[in-house]
Every structure is written in C-alpha cells, then in structure tokens.
Amino acid sequence: MRAALEAILLVVDEPVAEMQLAQIVEQATERVAAMLEDISARYTAAGHGFDLRRAAGGWRLYTRPEYAPYVERFVLDGQSVRLTQAALETLAVVAYKQPVTRSRISAIRGVNCDGVMRTLVTRGLIEECGTEGETGAFLYRTTALFLEKLGLNSVDQLPPLAPFLPDDVEEVLDASG
C-alpha cells in the first residue's frame, strides 16, 4: 500500500483526499490516513528534499522550504510570472476578509481593483462565492489553488495580521466600508 500511495502522489497535480486514495488502493480510510502520516514522518526523518503534506483538504508532495531557492531557479529560469504588488495586496484583502465584495476591497486598498480581480480570478486564486444580500454585489473568496500554492490546509492557518496593523485599524476599516 505504501508504494502504491507514493506512486499516486508522484503524479497528482492537486492535493488528493484520503477517502479518494483509500478507494483507489482499496483500503480503509483510517488505514490510509495512518499510512500517509507515517510516510510524511519518514520523509522528514530521512531528510528528503521533499515532504508529504496535508493541504487544501488532501495530501500532496511538496519541496521543502529550505530548497526553495534551487527549485525557483530551476522552475523560473528567467521566465518569472509573479503577481504584481497590487495583485498581492488585493489577494491579501480577499484572504483575510472573505467573503468580500469588489467595492469593499477597493475601499480597503483605496484604489479600483477591477483589473486585478480579473487577473486573480483568471489565475484561479480567487472565485465568486455568491452575492451580498443588501446590494446584490458578487462576493469573492480564495480557492483551493490559493491554499495549495501557500501549502495551507485552510485560511485559518494564515498568520495573524494584528502585529502589522496600526492601533486604530478598526476605525479606518469601519470608515472605509
């Protein structure tokens, strides 16, 4: 079962749920979950350059953070497709305030964010998730791809913002929205 799970995890392009892996290898979900935890611990103990981690509700192999400079150099090799500062700021607002409307994001950032929002939706990092009751404006949230790219299992794992904010932030946010 260990080898079968490793083989599957080598070819996935997004995190795979324990239940799905259990169906594929025809084993109990609990047994597969325990095996995944064991595989992850073994990779860590052996000092591999990769890690098996739980992210976005499933499991996937990731490179270890300490090897990021080498991986980035290999993958990017001069063709950087990074997010702009505006896109990063907008993505941060969505991540921490979701579900949130475009107008609220624009108010928080102090600039129109329509173009940046289109870019983030196109890249699959945010998505529409309904409408606001009062105004009918579309609400946006981050996607599973966002969680996967950050190696998080949920937005609850985002670091707290409080240490980076001014003391009167609530007054500022209330005034802007």
Image (cartoon, rainbow, N blue to C red):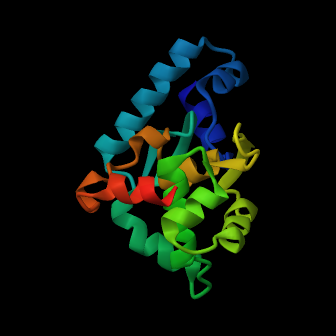
Q: What residue do we see at 72% from left, 60% from top?
A: 121
Q: What residue do we see at 23% from left, 56% from top?
A: 163
The image position of residue 9, as x and y in percent, is 61, 41
Q: Name the residue nearer the viewer: 59 or 108.
A: 108
Q: Is residue 78 visible?
A: yes
Q: Name the residue nearer the viewer: 93 or 73.
A: 93
The image position of residue 131, as x and y in percent, is 74, 42
Q: Is residue 53 visible?
A: no
| Left or right: 158 as drawn, with respect to 77 | left
Residue occupying the far front of the picture? 175
162 relative to 72, above or below: above
The image position of residue 10, as x and y in percent, is 62, 47
| Left or right: 119 as drawn, with respect to 160 | right
Q: Name the residue nearer the viewer: 62 or 8.
A: 62
Quadrant of the image containing the N terminus: top right
The image position of residue 168, as x and y in percent, is 27, 58
| Left or right: 148 as drawn, with respect to 166 | right
